[in-house]
Image (cartoon, grey):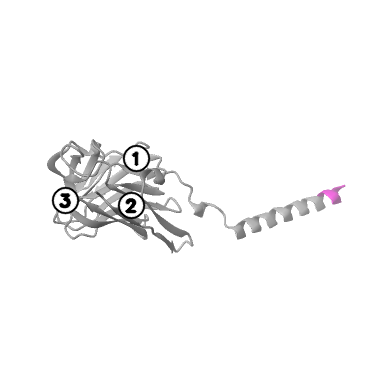
Amino acid sequence: MVFRTAALACVATIGLSGAVHATTLVTTRAGLAANDSIDWGQIGPASDIRYNLPVTATSVGGVTATLDYPSPFPTISRFDSGFDFGGGFPDGEHLVYAPTGEFFPLVISFDSPVKGAGANFEPGNVSVYTAHLAAYSAANTLLGTVSESGFSQGVDDPPGSAIFIGITEATADIASIQFSVDFNKQPFAIDQLSMVTGATDVRDVPEPGTMALLGAGLMGLTVLRRRKNSRAG
């Protein structure tokens, strides 16, 4: 039996531009309300061979994601759940696996910022663990971090029992995300990455003060035009 505890997190930060960044934990794929996704099967076949990083993959909607693992030996493995990877992922999922012995985050960078992203997550060993997902801006500014705890029984986990960890941001400012786990030297895997793309950045919307000034200016032009017309008559 697998238990999960979700530490709901909502972190607000204010950047130099004055924009407010708020990140929120999402614990189900349906709750993320994604409109795009990346299937890791395109990286290559599942095998014991490690793929040298960085590698790229393209979403259904055309967003290019670059995977990297900032360790001295940056590699990942490709497995398929239910075949060469036993555990709580749904059967047949194409997985990327951050190998053991190197305690570094799995970094996924996007060529076009997104509003949210998430995936099913499971460590490679039997343990109680906490998964973390951090979001960064294009300037590599931390927008926020969310965490979710779980318990993995390894191959005894029933399919579909892996936790889902996702993060959303108030604006489409997420240029990269980082998956990690708090258990030192613990390997972990993620399945298909779901994403929320195409959001409108609130910084493109004029602030109330700007709208008021614009309205006052238009009113002044209208009054001036009426005066000119009355004099001409």
As shown in the figure, which amino acid type bears the numbered disc 1? Ser
Query: In terms of secondary structure, what is the magenta stretch mainly?
Result: helix
Q: Nearer the viewer, residue 38 or 56?
A: 38
* Helix, strand or loop at mark 2: strand
* Residue 102 part of the magenta segment: no
- Residue 35 sits in which quadrant? top left
Residue 45 in percent (x, y) is at 18, 36
Cα distance in 3D space between marks 2 and 3 = 20 Å
As shown in the figure, which amino acid type bears the numbered disc 2? Ser
Q: Is residue 137 above or below residue 196?
A: below
**Residue farthest along the left direction in this orientation:** 48
Q: Is residue 11 visible?
A: yes
Q: Is residue 89 above or below residue 137?
A: above
Cα distance in 3D space between marks 2 and 1 = 15 Å
Tell me which label, 2 or 1, sits earlier in the chain: 1
Q: Nearer the viewer, mark 2 or mark 1?
A: 1
In the rendered structure, which segment of residues is drawn in magenta? 229-233
Q: Which residue is mark 1?
A: 37
Q: Which residue is mark 2?
A: 176
Residue 137 in percent (x, y) is at 37, 56
